[in-house]
Image (cartoon, helix red, strand yellow):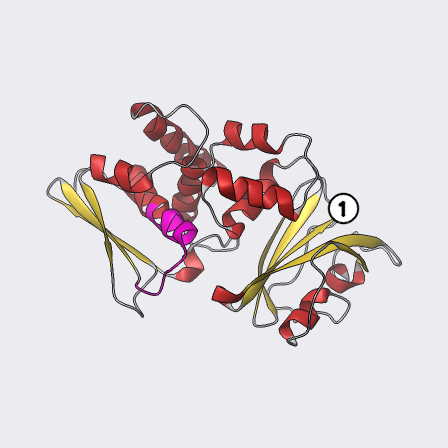
Amino acid sequence: MKETMALAKANAKKFLRNYGIQKPGRVDVVALANLESIYVQKGKPGEALGRICYSGGEGVITISGDVSLESQKRFIIAHELGHYCNEFSGRELFYICHSEYLYNPFMKNIHEHEANEFATELLMPEEWFITLVKKKPLSKKLLDEITGCFGVGLSAIAMRYAEFGDYPAGFIFVTDGKVRWCKFNPSFPFGYVPIGTKVSNFSYAFEFFEGKEIPDEPENILADAWFLNDRNYKKDFFIKELVIPMPNYQSAMVMVWS
């Protein structure tokens, strides 16, 4: 799997290089798609988040009418371009991509993983990302700066920071009070939260899903809130937590770091 991920990343680098994109900033994914004779259109509400159909030298990417955030539209387009660049071999190409295929590091579908890897590298090239976050403390301000530079959403940033960030940190994505996915920087002392786990009342995420006000700044919490099942669990060990509401998804992104 590591080899295929490396190939997907290399494909994204080559794609940017072929069109002379060398300076950090927001990559115009619609323009890039058009240059490949792939056109982007809005679909109907209730459809899969993204879809690509390519045949006879041209194609169409369709984005669900339910998608309103520009950052999510950009990632979906980049994801579908990933299918095109990673897999097109001269024949027809057709993919339907549901919400569970985007961002989720625990997904079993290798082609969707590859498309996510391509999209992440296309929108936030590794070298550009590392330069932007180098020696900067993890904070909501830094996340906003990354969003402003690359035009990506919080989930994509979480994946990237867990891989290349300077500080030991983790990101836990929670929907309707249950853990949907998580990803941790290798230097973070913990690395395991069971998927489907209900939010602990030791976490401010619990209060968020109870409809209560939560702090805007990081707070110290016991590691028990998330890591009781981790093999490195330590009693009375404190970590920092910041809960960022994502109301469009009935979700919250939880940042934790030591």
- The residue closer to the viewer here, 107 or 49, is 49
Q: Quadrant of residue 134?
A: top right
- The residue closer to the viewer here, 123 or 54, is 123
- The residue closer to the viewer here, 37 or 227, is 37
Q: How busy is the neighbourhood of tag 1: few (under 14 within 10 Å), some, or many (20 plus)?
A: some
Q: Where does the image place residue 141, in percent across and percent down from the top left?
A: 63, 44
Q: Quadrant of residue 45?
A: bottom left
Q: Where does the image place residue 196, in percent across and percent down from the top left?
A: 60, 68
- How many numbered callouts? 1
Extreme residue in the left direction = 56
Q: Main secondary structure of the magenta part?
A: helix
Residue 70 lies in magenta, yes or no? yes
Q: Is residue 249 left or right of residue 162?
A: left
Which contiguous range is marked in magenta? 65-77
Q: Where does the image place residue 206, in percent across and percent down from the top left?
A: 69, 71
Q: In the rendered view, tell whether residue 78 sits above or below residue 216.
A: above
Residue type at the position of mark 1:
Pro
Residue 151 lies in magenta, yes or no? no
Q: Secondary structure at mark 1?
A: loop
Q: Residue at x 34, y 42 (%)?
A: 82
Q: Residue at x 31, y 61 (%)?
A: 64
Is residue 204 among the parts visible in the rendering? yes
Extreme residue in the bottom direction = 210
Q: In the rendered view, tell whether residue 4 sits above or below residue 192.
A: above
Is residue 93 among the parts visible in the rendering? no
Q: Which residue is mark 1?
A: 189
Q: Residue at x 54, y 40 (%)?
A: 146
Q: Is residue 118 left or right of residue 43?
A: right
Q: Where does the image place residue 70, in percent across and percent down from the top left?
A: 39, 52
